[in-house]
Image (tube, grey):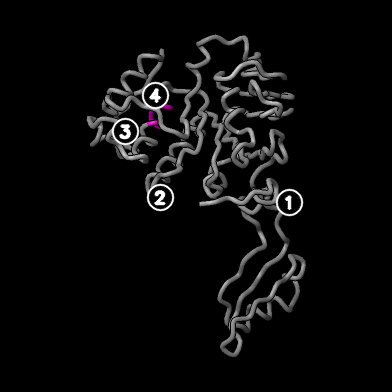
Amino acid sequence: MFKVKDLKFRYPKSDVCAVNGVDFEITDGEIFGFLGPSGAGKTTTQRLLIKLLKGYEGEVLYQGKPLTEYGDDFYQDIGVSFEMPISFSKLTALENLEFFKRLYKNTVDVEPLLKRVGLWEDRHKKAGEYSKGMKIRLNFVRALINKPKILFLDEPTNGIDPVNAQIMKDMIREFRDEGGTVFLTSHIMSDVDELCDRVAFIVNGKLQEEDTPRNLKLKYGKRIVKVEYRENGDLVTKEFSMEAIKEPEFHELLRTKDIETIHSGETTLQDIFIKVTGVALHG
């Protein structure tokens, strides 16, 4: 879908490149996670890919054709959900969606989408009266109304309760499974781990890592198994290498001790985020 080569962008009056020589590809039918700390260049990259920012250096190809050669028809292909919800506060949710539907050639019936995200009962309520979580869900529905080929999602579940967040994640996966492509930015690493086929980490405008979540966990994790068991009333922890779990000692421990937990040394994406970017996640 997208091929980005040596992408550079500097905001006017800035001496530093917000994006500084970035290379990556987004393949058709995948969820691609673009991760990094605040100010790393995530949002700038997203704005370049959706043609909100121009004047970049390098090459951006969309479906094999330079992005600069596309006109307004490009927006028929994409759906965008910004981190800060955008809606007309004096219009109802339904009026908002009907307004945006007029901008596109192909649209969907919004009733099933609103029902899915729990907004159908409040469809006649003004968007300005919506809570933040409701506005985010409305924003998400708006991103889907034009049957996009690719979704750009910026912190899609931030501020959403767990039940509705799971519904939205299911919808994102279904969009991918039906042939859609997703460019996702988020600080919620559990969501990224759950959704993304591949992830890339950007720090100070440069890509530091790019791979599948599984491969990154193998690279940064420890090849160990940790066993916790009770002995004389005390909790004892013992670690075994992956090679050692084939040995009699490990099997004897499992057979004879009161085992409470067994964990692999697999790391989390949150740990990897901190190692790669040097920045701790908050919240």
Q: Which tag, 1 or 2, sits closer to the chain's start?
A: 2
Q: Nearer the viewer, residue 149 or 133?
A: 133
Instruction: Determine which of the numbered discs, if any, sits on residue 114 in the image.
Output: 3
Residue 216 image position (x, y, % from top left)? 69, 48
In the picture provided, is 165 more to the left or to the right than 49? left
Q: Distance between the Cα atoms at labels 1 and 2?
A: 30 Å
Is residue 226 covered in magenta?
Answer: no
Q: Name the residue under label 2.
A: 162
Q: What element carries label 1?
A: helix
Q: Which residue lies furthest to the bottom in this view?
A: 232
Q: In this view, does 108 lie to the left or right of 205?
A: left
* Distance CA(mark 4)–CA(mark 2): 24 Å
Q: What residue type is labelled 4?
A: Ile
Q: In the image, residue 28 lies at what x, y percent? A: 60, 27
| Mark sitting on residue 145 | 4
Residue at coordinates 69% horizontally, 51% vertically from top-left? 275
Q: Give the range drawn in magenta.
A: 139-145
Viewer-nearest of discs 4 and 2? 2
Question: Is 141 colored magenta in this rendering?
Answer: yes
For label 4, the SS is: loop
Relative to residue 239, is residue 19 depicted above or below? above
The correct choice, above or below, for 240 with respect to 13 in the image is below
